[in-house]
Amino acid sequence: MIDENNKQDFLPQSYNDIKRYFQIKEEKQIQKEEAERKEKELKQLEYVRLAEQKRKEEQAERRQEKENRIIQDLQSKATEIKYPSGYIVLIGIVSFFLGDFISVFLTPSRPSFGSYIIDLLCCIIILFCLFFILGIYFLKKIRTMKWKKKHPNDPVNQYL
């Protein structure tokens, strides 16, 4: 029970000296255990704090990903509402080139009554194309106005 280091210096003269020596030794042991316990608690608290911080970062990252997905969905929905389908645009473009093709390749080199009719037909086709493109533009405006009127609080409206 007596330390090997202090064995030579330990010369008790009374029972109280021995008792005090063991009390001091026990207090040192208790202090050492207390320090180890506090160190262990600090390490555990640090571990818990780091785990909590990591959990919060992961939650923030998931929340950000969810917000980004929602924004992308809203933007794609707004695009679907705002713009007509590709077939309508394709019809307008094809009709324009068809009118040009007819006017250039089917008009005879000598003016005649038939050439004037073909030119008139080409002008009608080109005008149809222009009205068609304007119709697409107004269709887009009307669709967005109807959507905004029908769904005034929809978050898609900020992307229209």
Image: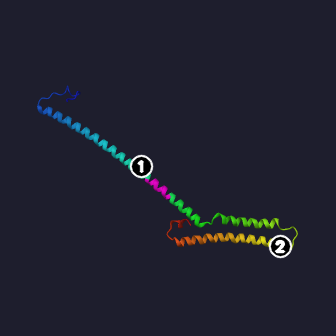
Residue 106 image position (x, y, % from top left) = 82, 66
**Among the two numbered marks 1 and 2 on one chain, the one whose residue lies closer to the N terminus:** 1
Mark 2 secondary-structure assignment: helix
- Identify the magenta region: 59-67
- Residue at the (73%, 72%) spot, across then down: 127
Which residue is labeled 1 in the image? 54
Query: Which residue is disc 2 drawn over?
Result: 116
Which kind of residue does numbered mark 1 sit on? Lys
Against 145, is 11 above or below? above
Residue extending farthest right? 110
For the point 67% across and 71% down, which residue is it?
Answer: 134
Task: State the colouring used for the structure image.
Answer: rainbow
Magenta stretch: helix, strand or loop mostly: helix
Among the 4 quarters of the image, the one containing residue 40: top left
**Mark 1 touches mark 2? (CB < 8 Å):** no
Q: Position of residue 116 (x, y in %)?
A: 83, 73
Who's the residue at 75% across and 66% down the image? 98
88 in relation to 26, above or below: below
Q: Amino acid at mark 2?
A: Tyr
